[in-house]
Amino acid sequence: MRAILLAGGLSLIFSMLGTRVAIRILAAKGYGQLIRDDGPTTHHTKRGTPTMGGLVIIASVVVAYFTAKLITRDAPSASALLLLFLFVGLGTVGFLDDYIKVAMQRSLGLRSKAKIIGQTLVAVTFSWLALTPALADSRGQTPASRSISFIRDFPSLTLPAVLAIALMLVMIAGASNGVNLTDGLDGLATGASTMVFGAYTLVSIWQNNQSCAITQGPKCYEVRDPLDLAVVAAALTGACFGFLWWNASPARIFMGDTGSLSLGGALAGLAILTRTEFLLLILGGLFVVQTLSVILQVGYFKASGGKRMFRMAPLHHHFELKGWDEITVVIRFWIITGISVAAGLGVFYAEWVAGV
């Protein structure tokens, strides 16, 4: 428990102080955000705001985690190292995208094919390692499972390794792009991510307290390294919270794809490693809705011969164009995230109480 508190607290401090320094450095180098012309006109005032702030989030999480491990003299677990690999790996893909945008003054960054290849390589490597028997613990538990899970694994729904890796790839791509789509208003994705990572901290702590490695029984959780996953989740919560100080409206820095892809990947990684894959659909309900709004917009546009379902997608831009102030959209979407997180935790706890 000390490691959880240390990781969360240190990450918050590192992020809050580090972002202040990053704003000055990025501004001096001219690494400012490019604004697309087809977006809301109110966003044009944000042109030039420093971007790539996700670098601070990534550094804060990694340094805080290993500092907490050093202080508590506890060895890092395979699950936590894999989660950090996924987090940093997708952050690297996002950084390349951001750097091309600011260096070449090209608003779309990496070509879509290159971006997909990068995400796929990181996700497949993570998935393969998470299933390899070489990383199993003394009870034979690998970090991830080939079974489909909601709050626990469904043993009757065990997939071949190739299909299990494919499912993880879809989850990681969906979550990383979901957070990326949500990161369009000041503080929106950062605040929503803070709440979901906080929820996963609680889930992992609960799973550790009821772990099958400690107490066998029908309600125990077959999860490898839940306590160490809680340490990483706490570090992610703290880093997002600290970054939000500077990212809240009016934002003085943006996380860029560096932050959004890495945070989305971490959400998917936590869902996979805690055996709560489909629970993420509830906890991260806002990200699901945002992604669906884009899918529906594109699908309806093609099917109807050029008509639009929303004024603009993702959904937050639709409400902006309807006349809502940006801060109003952000706060109301945070409320939606809070409701989603409360519902997800309620379902998680209710399943344990019912003993299903």
Image (cartoon, rainbow, N blue to C red):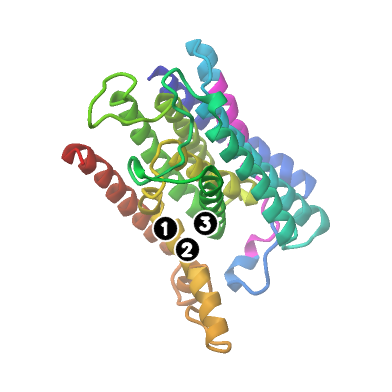
Query: Could you classify mark 3 by the number of other residues whose Cα lies within 10 Å: few (under 14), some (14-19), or many (20 or more)?
Result: many
Q: Which residue is mark 3?
A: 178
Is 50 inside the magenta-drawn segment?
A: yes
Q: Which residue is mark 2?
A: 290
Total numbered circles = 3
Q: CA distance from mark 1 to mark 2?
A: 6 Å
SS at circle 2: helix
Q: Amino acid at mark 2?
A: Gln
Residue 320 x %, y %: 48, 71
* Discs 3, 2 touching: Cβ within 8 Å: yes
**Nearest the eye: 244 or 103:** 103
Q: Quadrant of the C terminus?
A: top left
Numbered mark located on residue 1 in the image: none
* Discs 1, 2 touching: Cβ within 8 Å: yes
SS at circle 3: helix
Q: What residue is at 27 percent from the left and 29 percent from the top?
A: 220
Q: Is residue 46 above or below residue 29?
A: below
Is residue 345 at least partly visible in the picture?
Answer: yes
Residue 292 x %, y %: 47, 66
- Give the residues in magenta: 45-66
Q: Amino acid at mark 3?
A: Gly
Q: Which residue is mark 1?
A: 286
Quarter of the image for residue 147 reads top left
Mark closer to the chain start, 3 or 2: 3
